[in-house]
Structure formats: structure tokens, C-alpha cells
Image (spheres, grey):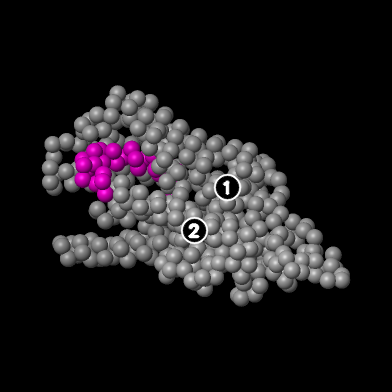
Amino acid sequence: MRLLGVVALAISALAGDAAALALPLARGLLPAVAIAVGVVRGLLRRVLLLLVRVVLLVLLLVRVVLLLRVLGVGVRRRVPLPVGLLLRHLGVRGGRVRVGLGGRGRGGRPGPQQGGWGPPPAPGGNWNSGWGPAPAAKPGVIPLRPLGVGEILDGAVSTMRAHWRTVLGLTLTVAVITQIADILVQRYLLPDPPEIDPDATGSEAIDQAFDSLRSSMLSLLPIGVLALIGTLFVTAVLTVVISRSVLGRPVTLREAWAEARPRLLPLLGLLVLMPLMAGAVVGIGVLPGVLIGSDAGAALAGLGGLAAFVVVIWLLVQFSLAAPALMLERQSLTKSLRRSAKLVRGSWWRIFGITLLTLLLTFIVSMIIAIPFTVIGTLVDDGGAGSLFSGTVSDFGWPFLIITGIGAVIGSAITYPISAGVAALLYIDQRIRREALDLDLARAANLPGYETPGS
């Protein structure tokens, strides 16, 4: 049961919405944290500091390399093996620092910014002779060429800035509705968390902690359904918004909704299928050990659960581009899954790295917003921080639910567009790398030099 709880938590963090799950997770784990805080506080602090430093170092390294390439400084020295592997997974080829600008593109062919992909030179000579390759066309939020990880994240944020009325109008509406439903569910439908004995020691304390964890997992079920509904609308509409922003075209919320509405049912089927598939894989992995029982069965269930977790991660990344394919290519459910597998083939580690970085960033942002609101809500609701460690936290009143709900709305408004934007831009980037989609996008944006012959 403990293994199932840990694996289910990991699957929820990968497949669900980080902002929607951060607050319920913080609420449900408060009693368990009150028991173990003296033991794990120092270790958790060190791990978080190390994790933040690693993320900042990676982002700084990628940004410096991009800046050097933009300035025309050739960075051709070999980098250390761990850094080289990480950069290669994030889009850098060959162990040498070549990120996004220059280099070779799809299948070894020159990128769109090099000779043969841009407009033909004017009669009488090459207009850019002696000045290096021509810059890639950029009609919208991204340049029309293979993208680096920084450009994908920047494109998602730029879409928020360029269409802030549409994006905020959608995300705030969905977040407010889902949080109101969440508050009502928390208040009237969910059972009270188990009581915690502050004097428990040894195995009793561990059992109480896992009872609290089990209760919090049960409370995540209706919240996960609400998050699924919210993700359905946000993903459908924001994918349309991002496809327009790549071309530099304006789009209103009414226009995006009209284009996305016919695809809601297939997208709902996809969003339901993914967690069901993950749960089925985990169940198959742990079932033999559960049937055997005893200590040997527990060990077998542990090994099966770990193997199933690896398979689930592989499947989630393999089908991570199915939603954009379903929305933008008007594919059926099964065809969108096959389409995603085809686009991801050969780039699994790169997509995994960018997806993991996005999940980490959105989760950190969600927790940064959620923790202060959770603390304030606890102080207002219970009258002091001492109740967190006294074992008397058994119910949440209206002040706590309302204050934490406000924090969840703010977090969702920030993280929803980033998650949806990165998924859509990863899909576009893979099609640019494999299918020269940049030429079709340039023609669709009516850029000079990309007209269809004979037009």
C-alpha cells in the first residue's frame, strides 16, 4: 500500500496539473509533516537548495550559450561529459555547444536560416555576403527553425504577453470555477482527516503518517477529476491560441473557443485514457507480488512497481504530443497517439528533459504561491501555528478553504499557459525538425520569399 501511494503520487505529478494538486497535497500532508518534521527538515532543505541551484545553473548555462551564439562567438570547446549529455538531451548535438542557432537541422540538412532555406539572393550578388547566415523568419512568438529549450519556454511566456486578455480570461475563468467546486467538495464531501496522536512513537507514528497519506490520496480523487475538466478546456483553447501566435495573428477568446469546441470530446477521451493506462500498467506491475503475499511478495511488488513506474514515464513522454496533434491536425484519438509516438521517436530524452524541466518550474511556482496562502489560511482558521504541531488539525474551515483557493487561482493562472504552451511548441518544434514545417508556417504567414511557386 505504501508503494502504491508513492507511485500514484508520482503519476499524479506527471499527468495532472501541478497548480491544482499542490494545495490539496499540502493540506493533506500537514498532520504527517507534523510528526516527521524534526527528522526530515534538514535533509529536505538541503535537497531543495541543491535542486534549485541545479535548475538555475542549467538555465544560466543555456542562456549564456544562446547569448554567445547570438553575438557570433564560436563556442567550440569540448564540455565535460555530464554537461554535454544534459545539453544534448535539451537539443545540443554532438557534444559541442551548438544551441538552436546555426548548425544543421532535419536529418543533417542545413537549418532554415542557412543558404537554401531563406529567400533567394537579389540579382547581382548575395545581399548577406560576409555577414554570416540570414536570421530565421519570426512572424510570431518563435523563430521558424528548430528551437532550443530556452526558446520554447520563452515562446510560452511570450504567448501569455501577446494574448494576455485571451489567456487570462480563459485561465482565470476555469481556475475560479474549478476552485469553487474544489472548496465545496473539500467542505461537504470529503471525510475528515485521521486524528494524529502527538505522543505516538516508533511504528505507531509511521502507521499514522501513512494513514494520513492514504487519506490525502483519497481526497485527491475528486480534485483530480476537477483538474482534468479544467485541463480539458485550457488545453483545447490555448493550443489554438498558440498556433495563431506562432503565425503572428490575433485571436479572441470567442474565435479560439469556436475552433476548439468540436475537438473537446476526443480530447476528453485522450485525457481520460492517459491516467487509466498509467494505472493499468502500475496494477499489472504490482499484482503478482500482491497475490503472493508475505515478505517475498512485498519485495516482488516493490520491484514490479519500480519497473511499472519506468514504463509509465516512458509511455507518458511517448504520447506527450498527442493532444496538440489531436487539436491541430484534427486527428482521431488512436491516430493522434500514433502521431505522437512518431514525432517523439529518436528525441525521447530531449522531450523528457524539457517536459521534466517544465513540470519542475511549474511545481516550484505553484508551491511558492501555495505555501504562503496555506500558512496564512491555517493561522486565520486555527488561530496560530501551534496547531500544526499539536495534532489537533482535524478539519478545515471556510477561511482556510477560501484563502488557499485564492492562492490556487493565482497559481493556475500562471502555470496553465506555460504547461500548455510548452506542449504545443514542442509539437511544432518536432515537426519543424522532421517535416520542414517552418516552410509551411512561413507560407501561411505570407512572408516574402516563401510564396508557393506559380502563385
Work out whether residue 317 or residue 425 is closer to the camera in this orientation and state it: 425
* Residue 15 can be seen, yes or no: no
Image x and y of residue 286, in percent: 28, 62
The C terminus - image quarter: bottom right
Magenta stretch secondary structure, dominant: helix
Q: Circle 1 sits on which residue?
A: 157
- Toward the viewer: 146 or 285? 146
Q: Amino acid at mark 1?
A: Val
Kindly state the secondary structure of the residue where label 1 is placed: helix
Lower sequence index among marks 2 and 1: 2
Q: Nearer the viewer, mark 2 or mark 1?
A: 2
Q: CA distance from mark 2 to mark 1?
A: 20 Å
Residue at screen point 49% across, 36% down: 410
Q: Please check the rendered image and state whether residue 40 is part of the magenta-colored stretch, yes or no.
A: yes
Contact check, label 2 and label 1, Cβ < 8 Å: no
Q: Is residue 86 magenta?
A: no
The number of callouts visible is: 2
SS category of the residue bearing label 2? helix
Give the residues in magenta. Answer: 15-43
Q: Position of residue 167 (x, y in %)?
A: 60, 42
